[in-house]
Amino acid sequence: MESPKIKRALISVSDKSGLAQFAKSLADHGVELCSTGGSRKALEDAGIPVRDVTDYTGFPEMMDGRLKTLHPKVHGGILQRRDNESDVAAAEEHGILPFELVVVNLYPFRETIARPDVTVDEAIEKIDIGGPTMVRAAAKNHAFVTIASNPGQYDRILAEVQATGATTPELRRALAGEAFAHTAEYDTAIAGYFAKLAAAEGDDLTPAELSITVTKKCPLRYGENPHQSAALYVNADAGPTSLVNAEQLNGKELSYNNLLDLDAALGVARSLPVPGVAVLKHNNPCGAATALSVGDATRKAWDGDPVSAFGSILGYNTTVDAASAECLAEPGKFVEAIVAPDFTTEAIEILTTKPKWRANVRLLKVGEVKPGGGELQLRAIDGGYLAQAADDMADDESEWKVVTETQPSDAQLAELRFAWAACRHVKSNAIVLSQDNALVGVGAGQMSRVDSVEISIKKAGDRVIGAVMASDAFFPFDDSIHTAAAAGVKAFIQPGGSRNDDQVIAACNKHGLPMVFTGTRHFRH
């Protein structure tokens, strides 16, 4: 069947970007425009001839605009099949005019619920009913109807209308697919909002059914390895300060592995006191520090493990300044990427002109780095997903207990607090050593906690003397305590909870060393 000429368009949009120009071009090509409320007024204000839907249906808007397009004359005009005699006869009998073009986008629900002060009633009023119904009807009947569900489609449609007066079946099918994706994402946002309301009334963040809608932002050169294809997708809820929306100020395109490490670096930086700096390698922090200045924190973080730091990813929770940039640009250092709230002009100048790697280093400006909020986190497994609340919220220190005869000094307690904040970001089994609010030794991802202890001590070298040790989970035996004490460790922090806790505590008491139980485990697999 030949594509129907576009003679009549139904317009009802919330986002009026580009509408006037699009509608005028349609009107100039003899297309009759029929519109509702705010859209009709926008067209009239632009001097474009338009017919009010209520004039066509003979039925007024009511209930504060909730009821205006839910009418047989509207949906019959969208859904009628032009090659079906019964449909055509019904339309003629009831005075239903065909719409060959439907231009509809939906109430700004996501934008509304993103406001921190939004009420439930305000959110509910932004749940569109008539809009999705028209969009779905037009998409279903795309054999005869063109659906424009966002302003970015106007040029494609107009180009074909100007050329032939109609649109091609290929374009209508593509637009139908985009329309169904649009309404699916819209319903996902609504379902997600109600799931959060339910979670706020209880402790379970995991709804019975979970819908995921993401949009492809860009392809990546490859995945973890060159033979794996990959792409970056963006969650519709991603805020302007999220990694996926960060502004890249310099450097090569980001790789799959870069993004994983940048995400991890940002996570560590969020947990640290300001100014805090994290140095990541293969998704584990090999250095992290806080200091009075961000420049000093940068140097301390790098010096935590300078061998591993070569070719690393850095995360900041404050603006990168000239002192930080000068430190990183020193000979013998190499940085793959840096993510930070911002960069000073001087820092950008130094990082993009001084080191040998200046042209390639990725600099990402992410905006304000806020503490985590325990949001639902998904992880793909074969055939499904695992869901959990993100482990990114601060522990309740009122639950911490000193379980040894020796009490930690104020300085030791502050150091233990820093070590504990960093330890949760190391892959299990995780052991970290810190001194002067900087990591000096890390043991990560070992099958035995004893191995992680020994690796952290080896990494620290002489800096183990006077350091504190944090463990992401309990020490199952006292052997690690004796090993650490012999090396010079002066205090410990761990969750506790082993059946051998008494033996572990006794080992600390034997060496006269303090130990804090937090009561919270921080496995990271």
Image (cartoon, rainbow, N blue to C red):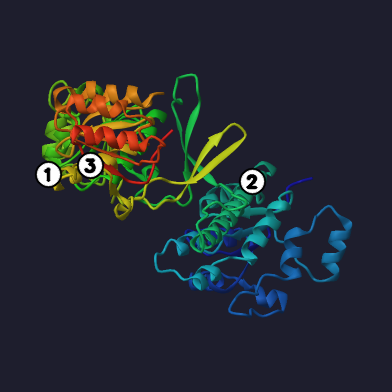
Mark-to-mark CA distance, 2 and 3? 54 Å
Residue 192 at x, y percent in the picture: 54, 56
The quadrant in which the N terminus is found is top right
Residue 257 at x, y percent in the picture: 39, 28
| First-in-chain label (2 vs 3) | 2
Dot 1 crowding, Cα within 10 Å, few <14, some 14–19, many 20+:
some
User: What residue is at 66 percent from the left and 80 percent from the top?
Assistant: 60
Q: Secondary structure at mark 3?
A: helix
Residue 184 versus residue 476 in the image, above or below: below
Nearest-to-viewer mark from 2 and 1: 1
Q: Secondary structure at mark 1?
A: loop
What amino acid is found at the position of numbered circle 3 in the picture? Leu
> Is residue 171 left or right of 460 when viewed as pictured?
right
In this figure, which residue is indicated by the disc labeled 2? 177
Residue 417 versus residue 68 in the image, above or below: above
What amino acid is found at the position of numbered circle 1 in the picture? Ser
What amino acid is found at the position of numbered circle 2 in the picture? Gly
| First-in-chain label (2 vs 1) | 2
In this figure, which residue is indicated by the disc labeled 1? 293
Residue 177 visible? The answer is yes
Res. 10 image quadrant? bottom right
Name the residue nearer the viewer: 292 or 407. Answer: 407
In this figure, which residue is indicated by the disc labeled 3? 416
> Is residue 281 left or right of 343 when viewed as pictured?
right
